[in-house]
Amino acid sequence: MTADAVPPKFLSLEFHARFFPGLLRDRYLRRVRSETPGTTFTSTTEMTVTLVVCLILAVIGIPSALTRGSIVGWILTALGVGGTVLLVILSVAGQWGTRPTYGDFLGGLFFFFVSLAVPAGVAVGMETHSPWLGILAGIAGLLAGYALGILAGLRMQHLGWIATIVNMLAGLAAIIVAAGGVVTLVVVMMY
């Protein structure tokens, strides 16, 4: 099975039992074997560095512009925010007309949405003091996160090269959210 193969219908058992698990397995085992994943858009170091510089300019400029009314702060803010908006527009425009594919699936976003279910279920269970309601809310959250994660993993490809940055940050956030959910669950079970 290749990720570029025509996928079965989303609401079919074949999609969720064979195609999608195979896609995730192939995508992450390929990375473990040190193969380079393909992509339909380019992710250049220069664009990423420019985005980081624009964000730093905005972070430096906004507080001094708003609190002290500094002209230098306003210039830094305009350069930072304007540059960031321009880079996002250029990234989306570069991807315009290209259909998202499962070959470029953004797994970090998928796992982020799935990992949000654990803390949601724990929070519902803690609020109602009912472990069963927490388990049911966790299962419902997992199902919703699974569906939204697949949608996000595909549709966020429209962002172009910025999608790779968003995907990396979402993957890191997924690890943090899942770890926080597990720690919360252990603490709740202890009391």
Image: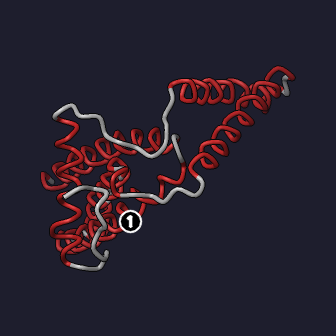
Q: Nearer the viewer, residue 122 or 62?
A: 62
Q: Secondary structure at mark 1?
A: helix
* Residue 55 image point, x, y percent: 62, 30
- Residue with the most extreme top position: 72
* Residue 85 image point, x, y percent: 69, 41
User: Image height check: is 4 above or below 134?
Assistant: above
Given the image, on which type of amino acid does mark 1 rest? Answer: Leu
Give the residue at x 51% y 29%.
44
Q: Nearer the viewer, residue 125 or 111?
A: 111
Give the residue at x 34% y 68%.
147
Q: Nearer the viewer, residue 126 or 99?
A: 99
Q: Nearer the viewer, residue 93 or 170?
A: 93
* Residue 125 image point, x, y percent: 25, 67
Residue 185 appears left or right of 91: left
Q: How is the image coloured?
A: secondary structure
Q: Residue 136 sits in which quadrant?
A: bottom left
Categorize mark 1 by other alpha carbons within 10 Å: few (<14), some (14-19), many (20+): some
Give the residue at x 21% y 31%.
34
User: Image height check: is 185 above or below 148?
Assistant: above
User: Image height check: is 170 above or below 97?
Assistant: above
According to the picture, the residue beneath numbered tag 1 turns out to be: 148
Q: Residue 115 sits in which quadrant?
A: bottom left
